[in-house]
Amino acid sequence: MIERAKILIIEDESIVAEDLKEVLEKKGYVVPGTLSSGEEALEVVGTCHPDLILMDISLSGKLDGIETAKRIHEKYNIPIIYLTSYSSEGYIESAKQTDPYGYIVKPFDPPSISTTIEIALHKYAIDTRNKISLDTYRFIAEYTSSWEMWLDASGNPLYVSPSCERITGYKPAEIITHPRLLQDMVFSEDRQIYADHVGCAVGSQNHSDTVNFRIVTRSGDVRWIGHSCIQIRDKQGSVIGKRISNADITSEQEQIHDFALAFQESNERFLLLTETMADTIIFVYDEAHGL
């Protein structure tokens, strides 16, 4: 348990609120107060700075717990656990939209309260560390010419750098909202290369961290992409995401192509020359040695 965590209770049934406060204080948590309405919560949160909020879904006043949570999240990054006696799908689905860190169902079971809180605080600490890492990566990526990305463990984009639009024509928000754009952009003849790369198991012998393929931009242009990625793992070794860098290497690929064509033409001219000089003997004279 994270000792001395400060937990604010927002519950409009005073007896329930006091019972919950007593349970939390016995477990070593600090409870700065209990509030009965969303309006009170919005006034107090900014000065109280709790580590966690226990919020009843049904509150007295104009704001219910779900709306109060939404407004708190607009200003503060504070984890919220809902207190509820409701189990209907409508309430649960609405509550999910505010990204709660758990639910405590009334009537309370003291041991389960402590477990739910400890899990929520631990998960919040992990989320905070990941957010710091992502913010640092985002800051660096904003100043690179490459199209940078950060994916979660499921392959969904969490961050796409501004260079994405310059290279692909698509805004970062479009790719985050529609992840399928990533594979749809890949040139038809290169889709198998891309699919094999994405589908490789991490750590397998066939897995490659780098691959080159073409994409079709929003305007219809074809560009070469130098794609590199690195798996992000937690301390237990589990994959929690992926960092990706996509560089526009069209110019380099065109130079390689031009060189290959020039080399091929040179070979063809040489072969033609040797064929026309089949009966000719060529002497090379070295003046320095008189040979």
Image (cartoon, rainbow, N blue to C red):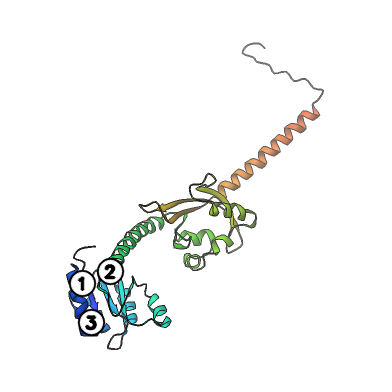
Residue that appears at 22% across and 75% down: 8
Estimate the spatial distance between the alpha carbons at disc 3 and disc 2, rounded to whole Å. Answer: 17 Å
At mark 1, the secondary structure is: helix
Q: Answer whether labels 3 and 1 touch (C-beta < 8 Å).
A: no
Q: Which residue occupies the extreme right position in the image?
A: 279
Q: How many marks can you see?
A: 3
Residue 268: x %, y % from top left? 73, 36
Label 1 sits on residue: 24
Residue 91's x, y, as percent? 39, 82
Three-letter code for the amino acid on which mark 3 is drawn: Val
Residue at left 58%, top 52%? 196
**Distance Cα–Cα, label 3 vs label 1:** 12 Å
Spatial CA span between label 2 and label 1: 10 Å
Q: Which mark is residue 104?
A: none
Secondary-structure class at tag 3: helix
Residue lying at the far top in this picture: please name it. Answer: 290
Q: What amino acid is at disc 2? A: Ile
Q: Amino acid at mark 1?
A: Leu
Local crowd at mark 1 within 10 Å, few (<14), some, or many (≥20)?
A: many
Residue 117: which disc? 2
Residue linked to disc 3: 16
| Mark toward the start of the polypeptide (3 vs 1) | 3
Helix, strand or loop at label 2? It is: helix
Q: Residue at x 23, y 62 (%)?
A: 2
**Horizontal and vertical percent position of residue 32:** 17, 74
User: Which is nearer the N-term, disc 2 or disc 1?
Assistant: 1
Comparing 33 with 21, the one in front is: 21
Disc 2, disc 1: CB below 8 Å?
Answer: yes
Q: Is residue 245 left or right of residue 185?
A: left
Q: Quadrant of residue 284?
A: top right
